[in-house]
């Protein structure tokens, strides 16, 4: 199936479990491909292939992808009538039917981005603890936890003008920043640390620029129009493919749990923590309405603000000595957001300050649970008053 034809030099196709860019004219390619990676001027195609299911699909023959990339490329390329020796390949568990295509132009310059992605299991932050160490072609396990192979953001990028080799490298930098910007906007947390994710552990990229268009472009950074177009198309394509693959959208991230998830919090654990601070009737009522409460815009805002301040404390932007006051003040915001009574903030602040929650992830999570309980216990004061008045008659 032809998905699109661009600048009289490129066709984007999708067949079965593969999306590929077919060059109608010569292109220069830089890629992470295991078989034809690096900088090449002799390729006819770059493709992105779904090599397995996203979960639980581990069979012995899958090892060919890592051990024998040339053989793997030959099998996939020949199946789709592509010339194996002239293909650069990307592999993933993401569904090719969720591939997002974005096209942008300025004057005679055109950029096309094609992205697939999944981040539920493998999102990570640059500098997170590694899992394996490679030497002499052998990967040695250096961590107890299993490496997660599924969860990959793959980017195919096509440019209708020739670039210098240095500018080709710069496109990879700019596209990577755009991918990270998308994850930042969606508040995706690392699965390997308590930081925000910058990508996944298996991300791949292939960039192609059309040859023979005149003096090669030398700039692909953020100050150049080319960099702007790369950033715009890649960010939009990453956001769309993650919404399709993982239902990862701004609306779904409007959630207290979503912002606390990178600290080990689940909806169940947060609910349990809040209920522990409530009496039986209030706890039962909260449980029946918890999704609506934790996703309330004001509650999610207050929790997101507290998490953001936690990051500022962890990064040293704010002094750790200020943590107790920050915890109490912004925990009171959470309580007020739940109750709706912002005039009670001084009371909430004092109650939370007395608990003395320590700076750290555990202290913050306990603070949020306590604040939610404080707010919920006072959410319906008019019913309590009416009940008391009725009892006094």
Image (cartoon, grey):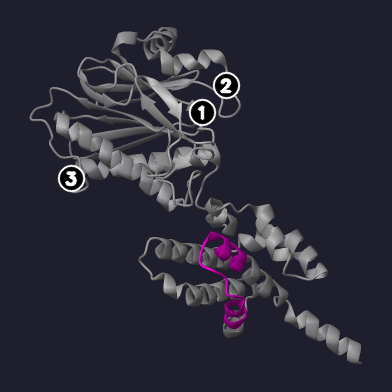
- Disc 1 crowd rating (10 Å Cα; few below 14, some 14-19, many 20+) is many
Q: Is residue 92 left or right of residue 46?
A: right
Q: Is residue 30 left or right of residue 121?
A: left
Is disc 1 placed on a helix, strand or loop? loop
- Quarter holding the C terminus? bottom right
Q: Is residue 362 magenta?
A: yes
Seen from the viewer's position, the closer of residues 112 and 79 is 79
Sequence order check: which comes first, mark 1 or mark 3?
Answer: 1
Q: Which residue is mark 3?
A: 224
How many numbered discs sit on the rendered protein?
A: 3
Residue 105 lies, in percent from the top left, at: 25, 39
Q: Which residue is mark 2?
A: 58
Mark in front: 2 vs 3: 2
Residue 92 lies, in percent from the top left, at: 46, 26
Q: Which mark is residue 95?
A: 1
Is disc 3 placed on a helix, strand or loop? loop
Residue 208 lies, in percent from the top left, at: 25, 26
- What is the distance, in whole Å, between disc 1 and disc 2 at their CAs? 17 Å
Residue 167 lies, in percent from the top left, at: 17, 35
- What is the distance, in whole Å, between disc 1 and disc 3 at their CAs? 33 Å
Sequence order check: which comes first, mark 2 or mark 3?
Answer: 2
* 5 vs 103: above or below: above
Is disc 2 placed on a helix, strand or loop? loop
Query: Residue at 75% of width from left, 82% of height from top?
Result: 382
Query: Residue at 37% of width from left, 26% of height from top?
Result: 134
Q: Is residue 177 left or right of residue 25?
A: right
Q: Is residue 189 left or right of residue 265?
A: left
């Amino acid at each position: 199936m032809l998905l699109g034809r661009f600048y009289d030099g490129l066709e984007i196709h999708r067949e079965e479990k593969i999306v590929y860019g077919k060059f109608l004219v010569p292109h220069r390619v830089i890629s992470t491909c295991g078989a034809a990676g690096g900088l090449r001027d002799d390729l006819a195609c770059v493709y992105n292939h779904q090599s397995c299911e996203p979960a639980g699909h581990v069979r012995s023959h899958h090892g060919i992808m890592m051990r024998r990339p040339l053989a793997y490329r030959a099998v996939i390329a020949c199946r789709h009538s592509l010339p194996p020796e002239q293909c650069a390949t990307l592999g993933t568990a993401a569904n090719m039917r969720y591939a997002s295509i974005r096209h942008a132009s300025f004057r005679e310059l055109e950029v096309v981005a094609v992205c697939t992605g999944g981040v539920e299991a493998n999102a990570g932050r640059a500098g997170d603890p590694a899992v394996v160490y490679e030497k002499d072609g052998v990967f040695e396990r250096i961590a107890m936890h299993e490496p997660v192979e599924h969860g990959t953001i793959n980017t195919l990028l096509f440019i209708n003008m020739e670039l210098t080799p240095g500018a080709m490298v710069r496109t990879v930098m700019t596209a990577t920043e755009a991918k990270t910007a998308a994850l930042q906007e969606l508040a995706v947390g690392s699965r390997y640390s308590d930081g925000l994710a910058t990508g996944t552990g298996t991300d791949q990229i292939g960039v192609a620029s059309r040859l023979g268009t005149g003096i090669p472009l030398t700039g692909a950074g953020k100050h150049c129009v080319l960099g702007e177009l790369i950033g715009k198309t890649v960010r939009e394509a990453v956001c769309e493919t993650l919404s399709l693959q993982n239902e990862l959208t701004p609306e779904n991230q409007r959630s207290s749990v979503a912002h606390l998830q990178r600290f080990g919090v689940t909806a169940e654990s947060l609910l349990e923590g809040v209920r522990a601070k409530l009496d039986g009737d209030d706890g039962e009522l909260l449980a029946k309405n918890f999704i609506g409460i934790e996703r309330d815009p004001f509650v999610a805002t207050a929790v997101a603000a507290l998490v953001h301040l936690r990051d500022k404390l962890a990064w040293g932007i704010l002094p750790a000595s200020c943590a107790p006051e920050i915890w109490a003040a912004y925990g009171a915001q959470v309580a007020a957001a739940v109750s709706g009574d912002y005039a009670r903030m001084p009371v909430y602040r004092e109650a939370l300050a007395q608990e003395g929650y320590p700076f750290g992830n555990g202290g913050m999570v306990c603070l949020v649970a306590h604040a939610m309980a404080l707010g919920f216990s006072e959410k319906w004061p008019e019913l309590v008053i009416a009940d008391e008045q009725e009892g006094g008659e």
